[in-house]
Amino acid sequence: MKTEERNELIVRSKDYKKSNELINAMGIGTALSQKLFAVGMLNMHIDETNNVVATIQGTQLRKLFNSTSGSLYQHIEELCDQQIKGSTIFQWQLLFKDKENGKIEAHQVVTDAIFEKGVLKKILKD
């Protein structure tokens, strides 16, 4: 099995739904950041503070990044630090425009990310 096919299995093995607004929100991301988003969608839960949290274990991250050894830190840093890659997971934004009523709403999809002990936790806008 090709590496690319193996990576796609992470996402294709489960179904999840997302709105057109959410698809557009992550449109500026890289293919890898969009895969990360999809895997996060499969691992969402509501924590004790009523935040929507996506927790991705190191084994899933390794498959996603096609990494068999070494630190995952560099991969996560590239997806979180705008100075390294230019686009990050924090640029995913839901934007609602109502020109007739002069109203615009912009909501960040991912508000926080914590990578610690090989586990990535993303806090999503509820």
Image (cartoon, rainbow, N blue to C red):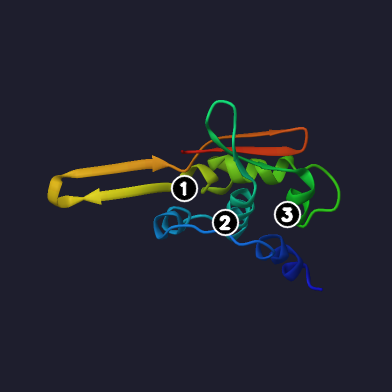
Residue corresponding to mark 1: 92
Residue corresponding to mark 2: 34
Q: Position of residue 59 (x, y in %)?
A: 80, 48
Q: CA distance from mark 1 to mark 3?
A: 20 Å
Q: CA distance from mark 1 to mark 2?
A: 10 Å
CB atoms at circles 3 and 2 under 8 Å apart?
no
CB atoms at circles 1 and 3 under 8 Å apart?
no
What amino acid is found at the position of numbered circle 2 in the picture? Gln
Q: CA distance from mark 3 to mark 2?
A: 12 Å
Up-down relation of residue 125 to residue 7 (above or below): above
What amino acid is found at the position of numbered circle 3 in the picture? Phe
Label 2: which secondary element: helix
Q: Identify the residue shown where x is 58% and y is 41%.
A: 80
- Of pointers 1 and 3, the one earlier in the residue sequence: 3
Label 3: which secondary element: helix
- Of pointers 1 and 2, the one earlier in the residue sequence: 2
What amino acid is found at the position of numbered circle 1 in the picture? Trp
Up-down relation of residue 6 to residue 56 (above or below): below
